[in-house]
Image: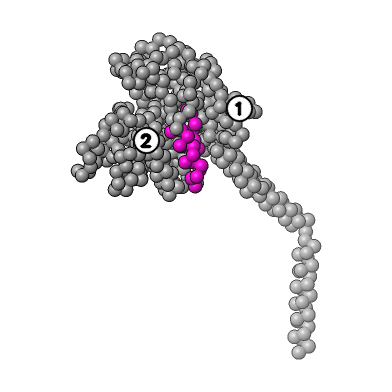
């Protein structure tokens, strides 16, 4: 028993001695421990630095025009920031700017021959050098490379009449000036740009986005009349039914509507087209009332089918014509913009659009271009089309007025884009910390 206790005591002393020896340690062992800790600290610091560099490098690679998108659109302190409450971008005047035009229509394969007025013989080029200048702010200078980057992976859809198609052509030509490989931009079905085709889509394959046009001049359904209809009724507008192709518009990222040019007696009653709501013909309904009814159908469709977290919706107001005698198809195209609009800045169609949008759930940005376009009788096609025997004081030459509409659209989009980039940068900076 005594021997056993002695052995245990001896063992305890040995263990105690070893523990003390380990705690005291040798100088050589302490240096190794210190070097090991320092190495681990350096690894942690290196990992943090690498992480921060990866974030910075990622932005430079994924968003090559990030810095450009901030600086190129802050030329002045009063640049339009996308807020209509801070600046009415539609209240202004036209001024000469010799940096215009922004593209050459003859170098853009997506401009209809009928809109390329210079190529069709127009000799005065002053109409392409006018820029819209708001009174209380400035439209940021258009920069194609940051715009192409902003639209990467997006789907832009125009819906409306031939005026909408002109704006569609304008935007494509503006963007093509920043694409080196022109063959990478193509119509998806190989179609030529014509008035008859209901769908045209141009793809910018290098940036993986498309700009599409759907011809829907009334936005609601236009159908041949039933057999029991009165003889004068050849077709009807179903004011409570959206166009049958409207399902094609729902998943766009940017959606731009227009309507109005076809809501005139000659293109409606003159062709035997009357209005219908449900199964009832409304032969006595006025055009303004029918237009408003159709807009309410459109507004209900947008509120029901469009996700505002994905899709930015615009509606462009009515574009004034400048006919000297519409019945005789006579028009006069001067060399300079008008000094007075002669009441053309007002339109019942535009008023209806502004009023209907106010009660919508989904936010809609109204491009109220009616007043600015009212001055531009000098920018119409006139006789410089692909059919010079017919005058045209409704459509616009390209380049020209529709380019300004697109500059305004891009100003709105860039304001949102910059805000999103700032939020991402702030979020990533917080994570890095």
Q: Secondary structure at mark 2?
A: helix
**Visual colour scheme:** one colour
| Magenta range | 349-370
Q: List x then y, in percent, for residue 370.
A: 47, 28
Number of labels in the image equals: 2
Question: Looking at the rendering, which quadrant does residue 85 occupy?
Answer: top right
Q: Is residue 358 magenta?
A: yes
Residue at point 33% right, 39% down? 284
Q: Nearer the viewer, residue 358 or 8?
A: 358
| Nearer-the-camera pick, 77 or 370 | 370
Vertical relation: 282 (above or below) 270: below
Q: Secondary structure at mark 1?
A: loop
Q: Residue at x 71, y 50 (%)?
A: 38
Kindly identify the residue that appears in the image at 67 percent across and 52 percent down: 40
Q: Does residue 125 appear left or right of residue 241 in this picture?
A: right
Please state which of residues 42 and 103 is positioned toward the viewer in this rendering: 103
Q: Which residue is located at x 43 percent, y 30 percent?
A: 318
Which label sits in the foreground, 1 or 2?
2
- Which residue carries the number 2 mark? 287
- Find residue 75 and report its horizontal and vertical position in percent: 61, 26
Residue 266 x/y as whole percent: 31, 28
Q: Residues within 10 Å of mark 1 (few under 14, many from 20)?
A: some
| Residue farthest along the top direction in this orientation | 123
Residue under numbered circle 1: 137
Crowding around mark 2 (Cα neighbors within 10 Å: few <14, some 14 to 19, many 20+) is: some
């Amino acid at each position: 028993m005594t021997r056993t206790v002695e052995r245990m005591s001896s063992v305890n002393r040995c263990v105690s001695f070893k523990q003390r020896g380990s705690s005291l340690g040798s100088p050589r062992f302490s240096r190794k421990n210190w070097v090991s800790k320092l190495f681990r600290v350096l690894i942690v610091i290196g990992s943090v630095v690498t992480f921060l560099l990866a974030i910075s490098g990622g932005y430079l690679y994924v968003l090559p025009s990030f810095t450009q998108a901030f600086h190129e659109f802050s030329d002045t302190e009063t640049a339009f920031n996308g807020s209509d409450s801070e600046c009415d971008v539609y209240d202004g005047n036209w001024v000469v700017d010799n940096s215009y035009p922004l593209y050459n229509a003859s170098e853009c394969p997506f401009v209809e021959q009928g809109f390329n007025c210079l190529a069709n013989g127009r000799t005065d080029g002053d109409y392409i050098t006018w820029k819209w200048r708001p009174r209380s702010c400035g439209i940021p200078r258009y920069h194609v490379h940051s715009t192409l980057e902003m639209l990467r992976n997006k789907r832009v859809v125009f819906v409306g009449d031939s005026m909408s198609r002109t704006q569609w052509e304008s935007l494509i030509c503006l963007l093509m000036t920043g694409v080196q490989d022109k063959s990478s931009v193509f119509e998806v079905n190989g179609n030529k740009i014509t008035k008859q085709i209901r769908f045209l889509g141009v793809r910018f394959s290098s940036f993986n986005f498309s700009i599409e046009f759907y011809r829907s001049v009334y936005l609601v359904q236009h159908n041949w009349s039933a057999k029991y209809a009165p003889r004068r009724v050849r077709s009807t507008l179903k004011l409570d039914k959206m166009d049958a192709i409207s399902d094609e518009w729902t998943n766009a990222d940017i959606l731009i509507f227009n309507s109005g040019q076809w809501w005139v007696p000659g293109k409606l009653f003159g062709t035997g087209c009357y209005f219908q709501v449900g199964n009832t013909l409304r032969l006595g309904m006025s055009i303004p009332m029918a237009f408003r009814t159709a807009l309410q159908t459109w507004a209900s469709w947008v509120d029901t089918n469009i996700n505002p977290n994905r899709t930015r919706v615009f509606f462009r107001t009515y574009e004034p014509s400048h006919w000297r005698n519409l019945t005789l198809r006579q028009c006069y195209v001067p060399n300079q913009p008008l000094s007075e609009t002669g009441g053309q800045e007002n339109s019942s169609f535009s008023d209806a659009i502004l009023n209907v949008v106010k009660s919508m759930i989904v936010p809609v940005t109204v491009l109220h271009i009616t007043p600015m376009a009212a001055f531009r009788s000098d920018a119409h096609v006139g006789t410089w089309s692909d059919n010079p025997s017919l005058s045209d004081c409704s459509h616009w030459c390209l380049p020209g007025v529709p380019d300004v509409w697109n500059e305004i659209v891009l100003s709105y989009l860039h304001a949102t884009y910059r805000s999103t980039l700032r939020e991402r940068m702030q979020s990533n900076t917080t994570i890095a910390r």
